[in-house]
Image: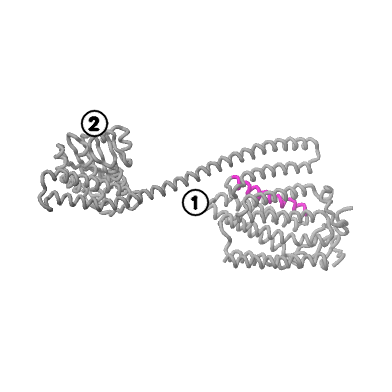
Amino acid sequence: MNELVLCIDGEPNFLRFFDLSLAPNLLYYSYISIIVVSLLLGVFVFVKDRFSKLSAILFSITLFFSIFILNELILWIVMPAGIVFFLHALSLLLQLLILVATIYFVYVFIERKNPPFIATTVVAILALPIIIFLPTNLNLSGVELDTCSGLIGPLWNYFYLLELLTIIAFLIWSIVVYRKYRTALIERPLSSLFLLLGSAGFLTIFLASFFFADQTGIYEINLIGPLGMLIFIGTLSFLIVNYKIFRNVKVVAAQILVFILWLLLSSLVLIVKEPTPLLVIFITLVITAFVGYFLVRSVKKEVKLREEIQQLAQSLAQANDRLKALDKQKSEFVSIASHQLRSPLTAVRGYASLLLEGNYGKVTSQMKEPLKRIEESSRLMSYAVEDYLNVSRIESGNMKYTFTDFNLCDQVERLCDDLRSDAIKRGLILLFRTDLRSRGVIHADLGKTVQIIQNLINNAIKYTEKGSIKVLVRDDVVRKILYVDIIDTGIGMNEKALANIFQKFGRADNAKTIDIHGTGLGLYVALMMAHAMGGNITVHSEGEGKGSCFTASFPLAL
Amino acid sequence: MKRKSTWVIISLAILTALSVSSLFYRAFITQDFEQTYSGDETLNS
């Protein structure tokens, strides 16, 4: 007897599921395997990433889809007319749920937020006719007992129209995403593009197969429809493996990919009856199992390695943050301590000077020497405090610069005039020379620039025992830079010293042999200040005892 | 905004439940639907 009679008289007999003579073999291939695979993916992703909204929506899609496919499967196996009517009518609702959940998933994936109220309302209004007219003749008017299927109404065409509009919307959306991708305006553009195209492909196959089956009455076309889900699952698995869209599921995705392959191959056994292809399938199955095992193992290894690297990076970042906080605390401490040191030091220095000048009565020759020492030591100490303060200001980003245009050449000449007496005291010659093609005007902070040059000339005087110090102001009008060279015939530096001279507390080894007080912060502060003003300081020396040349450069004012 | 969307979804869910119950009633209790056989012949309605 054929299915027709069974459709009228038949009882629900679920044992018929396994009666391969009742339905086309492809039914089992395309339906059962896909139910298993999609549910597996949904459940795994949901279990592994329970708190993510995306995984919850994905789980709903796979659940609706599996119920829908199961519904279709039962419809294929003949049943009494009541059940056929109920299930066929219900299948429209299930299709609607899959469509809405897919749109929701794609939206949340790309936009990373819930859809706005207006969008939810529009989708709800569009879905409303299907929900309201579900039990009416607009959906199904009855059952055709010849084919054991429902007599579908206009509501189905309305649904197909919605599906078509969604596909078009997805395609337009993917063009928008692609354009944004080209201009790099969007986060994760490629994965969004893949998901949109994958979802559009899934819906197209789904729509086409059910639409044409309904139109032609050849329901075998339906069998291709669920294969569309494979595109969706494939896209998702690809995204999981390549873009890690869900946390912790990379290994699971690899396992699912292997499982899909294995399941599809093994379900071929149901269709193929000839021994030779069966043998080929069997061998392929064995190879797939081996390859799959190694694939999953290598992915596991890679994931473990990556997790270790991530953990290391995280602890490094934490250590870095802690160090930064400690450094900041240190700078604050130095700043406070230096501020509190500066005021009493100024008083000590001032009163020592006043005493020396005889403002508090006659100073005996016996008292003069200790007073001079007090004055000199407090002066050195206040320089050191000033250096510490500058370092703490630079490191905390509190150093303030007032940019103006001024003639640096004039300033350097004045400085040389002021410092010449110090040089002469040490038996040195201080020369000032210019080689300018411009007016020598730069755009920088006047006080700080003078401080830098003064520091460099003072250093040259300190570290030169005999000979001369030449200060040369020159410019490069093409590169718009003004250079100040301070060339001395002093103690010079070796390569090691040259590399460390601008570091904090960096002093050349031979500098310590000369009895000169210094914090080792002067050059560091000078370089930091030069950098902040768009300039630089470089140093050159032929070696120890062969003198040095410090060059400070600043951008010329336009 | 989120609450408004939730109400829309809850309303739809209630409507869907009502619709499915009504469909169940039509399919199994009243059996008020057409049953065609061999083309044009109607067996039950």
Q: Say which quarter of the image contains residue A115.
A: bottom right
Q: Position of residue B27 (x, y in %)?
A: 80, 65
For the magenta stretch, what is the residue range? A219-241
- Is residue A239 found inside the magenta-colored segment of the image? yes
Rendered view: A127 above or below A457: below
Residues marked 1 and 2, same chain: yes
The reply to whether the magenta stretch includes residue A412 is no
Q: Dot 2, how many residues are within 10 Å of its Cα: few (below 14), some (14-19), or many (20+)?
A: some
Identify residue for label 2: A545
- Give the SS element for disc 1: loop
Asked whether residue A558 is in view, the answer is no
Marks 1 and 2, how far apart in space?
Answer: 57 Å
**Residue A149 position in % (x across, y down):** 80, 59
Q: Which mark is residue A124?
A: none
Image: A446 above or below A428? below
Toward which corner of the image does residue A107 lie, by quadrant? bottom right
Residue named by callout 1: A184
Could you tell me which secondary element the residue under label 2 belongs to? loop
| Residue type at numbered disc 1 | Ala
